[in-house]
Amino acid sequence: MCGPVITIRTQRSLVVIYLIINRSNFDLTTNMAAPTREGTANDVLDVRQFLEGWAGLVGNSQLQKHEDDDQEAKIANDMSISREMVEELASVCSTDTLLCGSEPEEGNLTAFPEVNLLTVRCQEESVQKRENDNIFRTKVSRKMRYKYVQTLAPPCQSEGSIECPIKIPEVLLNVKIFRPLYSKKKQTFLDQEFQVIGSNTLTDLRDKYSCVADFSVPGEFSEDPDMPQDNRAKDLFKSGFFFIEGTFYNDMRYDDCRDYSKVIIDWAKEKERGLGPYTSAKMETTRFVDLKLRLGQPYVYLHQGECEHLVVFSDLRLHGADDPQDAKAYPLLVHKSKPRRQLCIACQTMTARWIVHGSPLAPEDPSHFCDVCFKMLHYDKNKKKLVEFKAFPFLDKTAVF
Ligand SMILES: [Zn+2]
Ligand SMILES: [Zn+2]
């Protein structure tokens, strides 16, 4: 199965990488789809140089957490004033002094009936319409920018729970990984966003990132859909690479890992392409601090032969006192997309468990079916196929994560 699949997949990889090389102004720094918006990537940054340069300027004591810090005493000392004066300033400058005592309750838009602003009227009408009109409510909901993304709470940071304290100074990178571009709309959607530290290896990120393709069951099951589905794709096909600034970082931790990048590097060597030269390195020995990268530039993560994700580094800064202090917490998942259930095309109720290709009984090709509808439609009483088709197990994201 691997041979022809790899060939097709490699051709797609070449196209994606070619597009990326030739479209440096592709803006993927936002959470949602934005391929039509113009944007530019940053200049190439050397992460190690960034760390050493800024750590020298800031100093380690600024980056560490001091539990016994007395902020008021520090301010009094810095400003050469008494502690009482600092307390008075804190009280006079407090945001509480901005309140007049008759503020509306949170979320209550009708608290000021005498206000006749157009914006307030429009908002009130919109809220009313959303309450009464289901179609309008769905339309508005679909356009909400961050409705597909949820923010995760940072881990608990109590002193006793830290197993492996961060070695200061350290850098912190934000890495966005997008869903594969299967849709004909060619829109990019954020799948997960992580914070990684400079000492994390690229394989640390790979292991932390969950893609449903790794959990799928490879193989065609139409002859016997009750056959046990034990083998997960991640246990069978362990290869993968990150493509960052002209270098392919291959995961070669296991004996059966393949160097996916070789065929691409050889292809790019041909003079008429005008590409490269590209190099390769090992994913497991490369740390984020060793990278040279551009913020906002889309890179590639490829695994399972053809599952291609765009990867964007959106932020680079020093690790600070307010960040989680346990090195084991990283790569830290900070945002993830809300999974949407794939429904059975027949009953429109159950979650799909099968994807069927070439079935004359199905309304679309391919079609998703739940287990009950799939078997009722395609098999007789003796579990014999009624028509020719191919069936592959389908793993819905909501069932895995
Ligand atoms: Zn994937
Ligand atoms: Zn069904």
Image: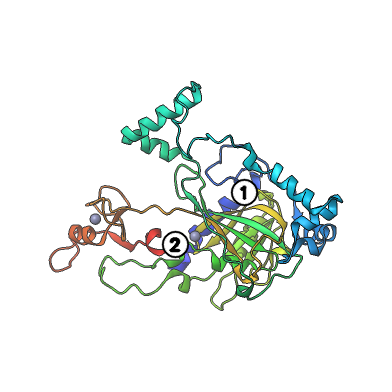
In the image, residue 334 sits, relative to residue 29, either above or below, namely below
Q: Quadrant of residue 60?
A: bottom right
**Ligand 2 quarter of the rendering:** bottom left
From the top left corner, tell me how far across and down residue 349 is, in percent: 26, 53
Task: Between residue 23 and residue 62, name the one nearer to us.
Answer: 62
Q: Quadrant of residue 280?
A: bottom right
User: Is the C-beta of the residue carrying label 1 under 8 Å from the nearest atom of ligand 1?
Assistant: no
Q: Helix, strand, or loop for circle 2?
A: helix
Residue 20 is labelled as: 1
Q: Residues within 10 Å of mark 2 (few under 14, many from 20)?
A: some
Answer yes or no: is residue 95 visible: yes
* Quadrant of the rendering where the N terminus is positioned: bottom left
Image position of 363 (left or right of 337): left
From the top left corner, tell me how far across and down residue 188 is, in percent: 52, 47
Answer yes or no: is residue 306 visible: no
In the image, residue 66 sits, relative to residue 141, either above or below, namely below
Residue occupied by mark 2: 212
Q: Helix, strand, or loop for circle 1?
A: helix
Residue at 31 percent across and 53 percent down: it is: 343
Q: CA distance from mark 2 to mark 1?
A: 24 Å
Farthest residue to the left: give it: 381
User: Is the C-beta of the residue carrying label 2 under 8 Å from the nearest atom of ligand 1?
Assistant: yes
Farthest residue to the bottom: give it: 255
From the top left corner, tell me how far across and down residue 227 is, in percent: 28, 73
The amino acid type found where label 2 is placed reads Val
Q: Are marks 2 and 1 in contact (CB under 8 Å)?
A: no
